[in-house]
Image: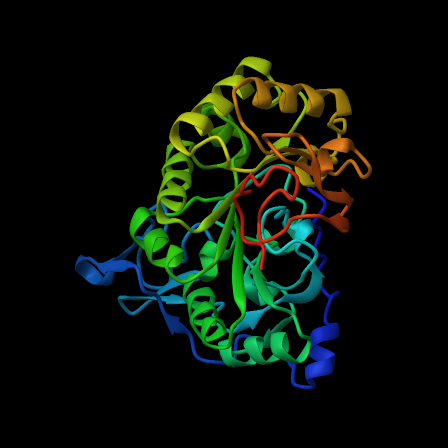
Amino acid sequence: MARKAVVGIAFLMLVLAGTATKQKISWPLHEAEFYEKLSHKKVRCLLCPHRCVLTPGQRGLCRVRINKNGKLYSMVYSRACTVGKEPIEKAPFFHFLPGRKRLTLATAGCNQRCKYCQNWEISQSYPEELPSYNLPPEKIVEIAEQEKTLIICFTYSEPIIFYEYMCDIAQIARKHGIRTAVVSGGYINPEPLKKLCGLVDAIKIDLKGFTNEFYKDVCGSSLQPVLDACKIVAESGTHLELVNLVIPVLNDDTMQIRRMCSWIRENLGDTIPIHFTRFTPAYRLRNSPPTPVASLEMAARVAKEQGLKFVYIGNVPGHKLENTHCPKCDSLLIRRRGFTVLENRLKDGCCPYCGTRIPGVWK
C-alpha cells in the first residue's frame, strides 16, 4: 500500500514541538495489560492470538513485549519512531472525516510477518535498532493540538503491539476533542479489542486474503482471528473500513474474492467500505509484478455483484472508483484524486439529491 513510513523522516512535528531527543532504551518499561503469570516466572501474553509463552528475558514474536522477572512489559511505551502529518485518505479512510489531516504515529514491531510489507524497516525491527523519541501520551496530544490536527492515527507498523501506549493516547485525546483512528491487521484477541473499540473512533483492518494458507504462508498468522476482529468492530459501532491489497497470484483468485465479499455482506453488512488496493513490489516480494489495474477492477466488480455498496480502488490516482457515489441514486458525492478530496457534496452526512444517509463519520 502507498503509506510508506521510512525511519528518520516525518519528524517535522517533533521539531516544531521542540522536545524530541534520540535515545537508547533508557526510560522505564511499561507493564503490559493483557497477560497471565505462569509457574517458574513464565508469562503468557494474551494480547494477540499468538499467545506467546515467555521465560524471563524472552520477548514475544512482536519483538517489543518482554518477560522481566515474571512480569510482561511493553518496550515501546512512549517510544515513537515515526510521527508525521498526512491526509486521512492515505490510511485509507474514505468515510471518516474526509479531507482532514491526521497526526500519524508508530513504534517498532509487529505481530505478523507479511512478506510484502511496505514498512518493514520499522515493523520488522527491534526497538533498540531504530532511532526513537521519548513522547509520552500527553505530548502526542499536545503536538496534535499545536498542529491543529483533529485526528491522531496509529499506523505504519502494527498499533496492536503498542496497545497500552495507544489506549492512553486515545483516552487523553478524547478529553481534548481529538478523534483517534487505528490502521491494523486485526490480529488481536477479543477482550483487548473490545476495550479498544470503546476508546477509539475508527478502525481500518487489512483483510489480507481469504484463506488460512495465505495467512500462514505470506503473513505468518491465521485468518479466523482477523474475521472475528472484523465482526467485533462492526458490532461495537466503531467506524470500520476494510482494505484488501490485491497481490498477483497470491490472493487475486476471483472465487476467493467472491467468497470474501459474500462473507463481508453476511457478517458485517453491505455498507462497510472496502478498498481494493494496488500492490507494489516490496520487502521479500520485490520480484513480484505490480497488480494490474484490470485485477483491481475485477475485484471491485465482484464486490458490487455480491451487494457491497461502497467499493473503492486504491493506489491508482485518478481512477473513477476513488470517488464516493450515492448507493441509491448514483450521484457523485465525494470526488477524489489520490489522497486529495477535490469536492465533497454531502450535506449532514446525506446525499443532497435523494436524501439517502451515507454511513460514516462526517463531522
How is the protein colored in the picture?
rainbow
Report the front residue among 202 and 106: 202
Residue located at (52% from left, 22% from top): 307
Residue lying farthest to the right in this orientation? 318
Which image quarter is the N terminus in?
top right
Instruction: Tell me if 361 is positioned left or right of 5 in this view.
Output: left
Residue located at (26% from left, 66% from top): 70
- Give above or below for 128 relative to 99: below
Report the front residue among 276 and 319: 319
Residue located at (53% from left, 57% from top): 181
Whether residue 174 appears in this view of the structure is yes
Locate residue 137, reporting x and y percent.
Answer: 50, 76
- Give above or below for 134 relative to 276: below
Locate residue 130, reporting x and y percent.
Answer: 63, 65
- Give above or below for 207 relative to 304: below
Residue lying farthest to the top in this orientation? 255
Residue lying farthest to the left in this orientation? 39
Instruction: Tell me if 29 is positioned left or right of 85 in this view.
Output: left
Residue lying farthest to the bottom in this orientation? 18
Residue located at (66% from left, 55% from top): 88
Instruction: Tell me if 194 is positioned left or right of 275 in this view.
Output: left
